[in-house]
């Protein structure tokens, strides 16, 4: 299993970029996301940028990963998932529409 890590682009050279997660830098492949400006946040998997994300999303993912890292080291989860705990679960739009119409799965 691989986990996506939010990375901020530091420099770009063609389809390659230097990026950081805040603790270390790495060289990543931009082939799947195309041209991006310096400062852009991407979700990286195994040396490849897979998706462009906004800073808020990068911060939430980073916070969750830090919380899980702490938990694995015997620490506390803390507020790693506050953004999820502060809202009610939501159905995908197509399931909510079916529920609103009174449809059920048999």
Image (spheres, grey):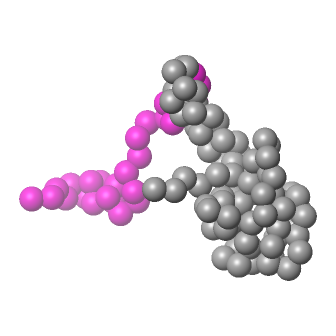
Say if the magenta span includes residue 84: yes
Q: Is residue 71 above or below residue 40?
A: above
Residue at (51% x, 30% y) in the render: 72
Residue 96 screen position, x and y as percent: 34, 55
Q: Describe residue 94's horizontal placement relative to residue 75 as left or right.
A: left
Read off the magenta span: 78-106
Where residue 23 sits: x, y (%)?
78, 41
Indicate left or right for 88 with 54 as reference: left
Q: Is residue 32 magenta?
A: no
In the image, residue 65 sits, relative to residue 34, either above or below, namely above
Query: Residue 68 location in percent, x, y?
Result: 54, 34
Dividing the picture into quadrants, the one containing residue 41 is bottom right
| Residue 52 percent coordinates (x, y) | 70, 64
Which quadrant is the C terminus positioned in? Answer: bottom left
Q: Which residue is nearer to you in this view: 54 or 24?
A: 24
Position of residue 90 in the picture relative to residue 6 (left or right)? left
Q: Residue at x 79, y 46 (%)?
A: 24
Q: Quadrant of residue 98?
A: bottom left
Tag count: 0
Is residue 40 something that shows in the picture? no
Residue reaching furthest left?
A: 106
Instruction: Please indicate, yes or no, whether residue 32 appears anywhere in the rendered image.
Output: yes
For image coordinates 74% across by 73% down, the residue present is 30
Please state which of residues 48 and 40 is positioned toward the viewer in this rendering: 48
């Amino acid at each position: 299993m691989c986990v996506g890590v939010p990375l901020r682009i530091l420099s770009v050279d063609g389809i390659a970029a230097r990026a950081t997660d805040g603790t270390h830098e790495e060289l990543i492949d931009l082939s799947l996301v195309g041209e991006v400006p310096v400062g852009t946040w991407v979700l990286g998997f195994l040396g490849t940028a897979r998706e462009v994300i906004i800073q808020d999303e990068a911060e939430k993912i980073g916070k969750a990963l830090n919380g899980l890292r702490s938990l694995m080291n015997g620490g506390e989860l803390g507020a790693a998932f506050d953004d999820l705990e502060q809202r009610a679960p939501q159905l995908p739009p197509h399931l909510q529409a079916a529920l609103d119409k009174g449809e059920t799965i048999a």
